[in-house]
Amino acid sequence: MKKIFFAFAILILSKFQAQTWKTEDQYIQRFATYAVEEMEKYKIPASITLAQGLLETGGGQSRLAIQGNNHFGIKCKEEWTGKTMKHTDDAPNECFRVYDDPRESYEDHSKFLAYRKYYQNLFKLDMKDYKAWAHGLKKAGYATNPRYAYILIDKIERYKLYEFDNTNSKEVLYAVLKMYPDLRNDKMFMAQLDQNKASSKPVTVTVPYQQTSYAQQQKNVQKIVTKAETLNSILIKSHPNENKKFVIIPDNVDLASISKKFGISESRLMKWNELDGNQLKRNDILFLESKSSNGNIATYKSQSGESMHDIAQKFGIKLKKLYSKNRMDFGQQPKPGQLIYLQEKKPRG
């Protein structure tokens, strides 16, 4: 009987020892993938996202994280239409967002930074300069704690989270394994690694552009995507015209699906992009914020079959402004080779 009890105790002990990761280590192992995926889509350092998640959730142990899958303490605000929960933070019983899955929380955090004007200067920083991003977040008013930037930097350096700024969604699990080699004994983790390896056979999609446009600055742009859904392959890019955020539509989709993915109303997307319908075609350029009043170059020669709307999207300029600068009636289309003015108004005569 003693032998049986001793063997049972050893079995229990071995299981316990296999799960001795600290709470924050477990958090990194589980959510590093999400942080890297968001980095690829929104150009926010994975180290910063992961450090913020660690801090906000106390290593995944906060009430908001456990009950609401809310990893970044994002409050409801007037535009939120999803589920909510009450939680005492700065004031009693404040309204916080509730997500069906932590991944939704990670993406909402990215949108929170990407689409609010207070944080626009962050995206001018080097994506691998986590210290500049940490101080930039504090300067932009993300947190009231005067030591917020230093707390993030401490977490990043203590756990070497900067390693995730140098990887991608196909390699992130290998980066995790390098940091935690004992995970080789974790059957669930290794199964996830094998599954990720099997599903990451890439397909190359070339985004065609005419030189003489924005494409001149992004020649031979190629995008590697997996065999995932079309929407999951859409990456946010920064247009050289005032760093306006836009996406390139990889296949024919409806505007509603883009609206849902990025959390921007259809009416806003239609207004910002001067759309007259809700169907998008492959290689369409769609801006995720209002365009500029001027182009990033002085003039441009129109191509055969190109409309004024096409030119407005290429150069991130409002369509009405484009018509006005060129002294054209709204709806009039350019002739092939016509000189289109993008900054100054076309001279009279």
Image (cartoon, grey):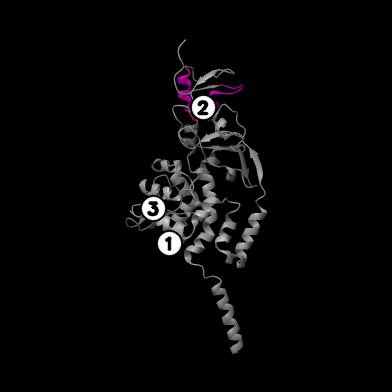
Disc 1 to disc 2, C-alpha distance: 47 Å
Q: Residue furthest bottom?
A: 1
Crowding near the residue tagged with mark 2, few <14, some 14–19, many ≥20 C-alpha atoms within 10 Å: many
Disc 1 to disc 3, C-alpha distance: 17 Å
Q: Is residue 25 visible?
A: yes
292 w.r.t. 166: above or below: above
Q: Is residue 100 visible?
A: no
Q: Amino acid at mark 3?
A: Ala
Disc 3 to disc 2, C-alpha distance: 39 Å
- The stretch in magenta equals 302-326
Crowding near the residue tagged with mark 1, few <14, some 14–19, many ≥20 C-alpha atoms within 10 Å: some
Q: Amino acid at mark 1?
A: Gly
Residue 164: percent from left, percent from top:
53, 53
Residue marked by disc 3: 149
Q: How many marks?
A: 3
Point out the tag, 3 or 2, that comes first from the N-terminus.
3
Callout 3: SS? helix
Residue marked by disc 2: 312
CB-based contact (under 8 Å), mark 1 and mark 2: no
Q: Residue at x 52, y 51 (%)?
A: 165
Q: Residue at x 47, y 44 (%)?
A: 126
Residue 317 drawn in magenta = yes
Q: Amino acid at mark 2?
A: Ala
Say which mark, if any, is on residue 58. Answer: 1
